[in-house]
Image: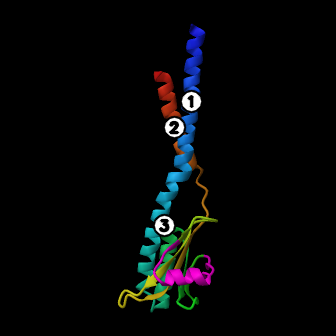
Amino acid sequence: MTRLHSRIVVHFLVVLLVVGLATSVIFALGARRAFLHDMARRMTRHVATLAAEHMGDPPGLETRLARLQEDLEVDLTVRDRKGRVVAAAGRVLPPLEGPQAARVLSGDTLLHARPRWHAAVPLVDPASGAVVGILRASARPHTHLASLVTPFLWVAVVLVLVGLAS
């Protein structure tokens, strides 16, 4: 009878471990992406608003982009409606292809997670409300192992506590 009890407890702990690991992987790789996507959209819209205030003042725009680049650790490139670089901070990002540029100039925001996070948003003149250019932002590559390990550690703590309680 003791052997059966031990087998049941071990089986329960293995099932608990598998469910915990699956939950960690789903959270670490899935749910976080939606949060990052939403934050990237909001951040680039705000940066575009700040940059648009200086669109007619190239030195002021360069200064503003340099400060934003330093604070946010992103590469920023502002182009006019024809695709010419007006100002950049960090690495100059390539221009958008025809259909993508047309989408952004019509007011859409483009976000992509691969090969690394990058976004393109319209620059809207605060006075007239017209789209005067495109801001591209790209995240610098960072490897944060802790951001992937933290969910696993929390699940491990919960598993140990449940295991001890059982």
Sequence order check: which comes first, mark 3 or mark 2? 3
Q: Is residue 91 above or below residue 13?
A: below
Badge 2 marks a residue whose secondary structure is: helix
Q: Is residue 153 above or below residue 124?
A: above
Q: Nearer the viewer, mark 1 or mark 3?
A: 1
User: The disc labelled 2 sits on which kind of residue?
Assistant: Val
- How would you rate the neighbour count of disc 2 (Cα within 10 Å): few for under 14, some for 14-19, many for 20 or more? some
Identify which residue is drawn at 46% across, 83% down: 123
Q: Which residue is mark 3?
A: 40
Q: Which residue is mark 1?
A: 15
Residues at discs 3 and 2 in contact (Cβ within 8 Å): no
Q: Quadrant of residue 94?
A: bottom right
| Residues at marks 1 and 3, CA–CA distance in whole angstroms | 37 Å
Residue stretch rendered in magenta on the structure: 91-110
Badge 3 marks a residue whose secondary structure is: helix
Q: How many marks?
A: 3
Sequence order check: which comes first, mark 2 or mark 1? 1
The x and y percentages for residue 46 are 42, 74
